[in-house]
Image (spheres, rainbow, N blue to C red):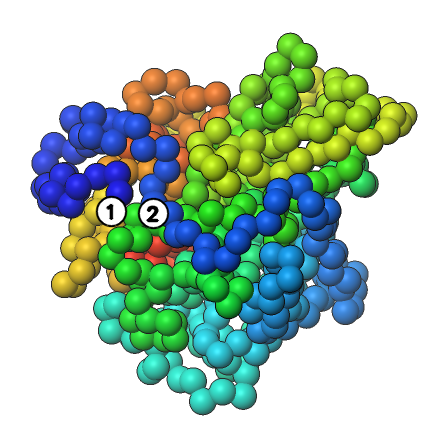
Amino acid sequence: MSRLSRRRFFSLTGGAGALFAAGLAGPRLFGSAATSGELLTSKVPLPAPFQVPLPIPAVLAPIARDADADRYEIVQRQTTVEILPGLRTPIWGYQGTFPGPTIESRSGRTAIVRHRNELPVPTVVHLHGGRTPSESDGYTTDLVLPAGGTHTTHSHGGHTGMQDPHARVTQGMRDYVYPLQQHASTLWYHDHRMDFTGPAVYRGLAGFHLIRDTEEDALPLPHSERELPLMITDRAFAEDGSMHYPSVDRSLTTVHGVEDSYIEGVLGDVILVNGAPWPVAEVSATRHRLRVLNASNARRYDLALDPPPPGGQAFTQIGSDQGLLDTSRVHDHLPIAPAERYDLVVDFGRYPVGSEVTLINRLGTGSTAQVMRFRVARRDKEDSHIPDRLSEIEPLDRAQATVTRDFSFRGGRLGDRHGWTIGGRPYAPSRIDARPRLGDVEIWRFVVDLHHPIHLHLVNFRVLSRGGRAPGPYDAGRKDTVDLRPGEAVEVITRFDGYRGRYMFHCHNLEHEDMGMMANFETI
Ligand code: C2O
Ligand code: CU
Ligand code: CU
């Protein structure tokens, strides 16, 4: 534990006390920590930045299309790829790639994705941000056992050793059905197996799923090669070129979690964008749309452009986690926590041709202070602009809420180990902590000890307040993940719409999630 002493940590996390009255003691203790986690240092020499071109994940072709559904097939398998020049890195990849292939869907058209698990461990696929029926949402115990393996549910002990009587386990494969009754948005899919999500995503199990709709198509936004999905991750590499992750159980079968010094989060010293280290993208001197996703396990970033464009306001934000904003917002810099998405427009026409513009991370130091580079290569015709009105967002008002619920996210005991809790309790797959009625509007209030990016499945929410005040500059729009800083309290409001069933909510710091910081709600 680097930034706080064990003693302070455990005294902080011991007694709940008058949590919601006083808040947690965070800011005074941890105010300076930019991110939760411990840095892992690579054992190989790091390459010079800005040498490799930015890869764009391939768009997956459907294997069949009928009147209202597109069918896809993805094989989850191990393979070896070159991430750092001259080194072979084993990964777990959707279709054997990292990131996995991008799925592009139309709003309201069902996507049916058959996942076949050829990995040595069970997997679960979750479409993050998807408004998905419970049986396809990737519930953490709904395992897809390895194809042809001898794996049974019994070998999946987990930290509680508890079997989930409602688990829907399949052998070898599963069809995930996504109705996608939702707005155009930048979603992503990733592994979600109970206790082992962190190491699985770290090894490569993450990909984009974009939804488009006619509302967005009608807007003159940058498109085609001027629309770039950017999946930002951090990794550390071992001597043999493998991704280094400090799992307690390297087989990822029985004992969950990471070595004690990493329980706040695993941070790497190599920044990858779409799987490439500090890549470079050649762009024309025109507006570009950047769909930024922080798919890191624990690292938070504060993105900015260096040099900033004349007059500042480098980023025009047009969307957040689940689609377009009502109207755009401008930012000089942009904090982004794990699992958050920001849809940005950058006008490279504000730079002279020949400029090198670096996307930097103001929370990083050394190798982690830079993310990627844009080379403004040529002039080109501008055919986009950002209209005043982008989307209609259903306003949700305090007065509409029928229920208010409180949840504290903090460190705590997990059996004989230290872990993370919600409401003082570590995750149990069969315990339901909230039962919202379908269609009801509720306010959920969160308080935290350290940094915790909090994510709800099924819904999107609006941030209602932050720290007892109005929402912050980055809180606009339809969110599904909200970043809380140490000691902070946030209220969100949402309508529990869509489908009945059991869903998870959790911290999206994947080390926290794997070590207890998850809970269930059931829409009834
Ligand atoms: Cu990004 Cu529960 O997930
Ligand atoms: Cu999710
Ligand atoms: Cu957390």
Looking at numbered disc 1 in the image, what kind of residue is underneath it?
Met
Q: What residue appears at the point 79 percent right and 19 percent down from the top-left corner?
A: 352
Q: Residues within 10 Å of mark 1 (few under 14, many from 20)?
A: some
Please identify the quarter of the rendering in which residue 13 is found.
top left
Q: What residue appears at the point 71 percent right and 66 percent down from the top-left corner?
A: 71
Give the numbered dot on residue 38: 2
Q: Is residue 323 above or below residue 427?
A: above
Where is residue 309 shown, x and y percent of the image?
67, 17
Can residue 255 be seen from the camera position used here? yes
Looking at numbered disc 2 in the image, what kind of residue is underneath it?
Glu
Q: What residue appears at the point 54 percent right and 46 percent down from the top-left corner?
A: 271
Where is residue 516 shown, x and y percent of the image?
28, 56
Give the numbered dot on residue 1: 1
Q: The residue tagged with tag 2: helix, strand or loop?
A: strand
- Of all residues, the one furthest to the top in this rendering is 311
Between the C-alphas of marks 1 and 2, the distance is: 7 Å
Q: Residues within 10 Å of mark 2 (few under 14, many from 20)?
A: some
Where is residue 329 shown, x and y percent of the image?
59, 20
Can residue 433 be seen from the camera position used here? no
Circles 1 and 2 in contact, beta carbons < 8 Å = yes
- First of labels 1, 2 by sequence position: 1
- Of all residues, the one furthest to the right in this rendering is 381
Q: Is residue 268 above or below residue 135?
A: above
Which residue is nearer to you in this view: 112 or 349? 349
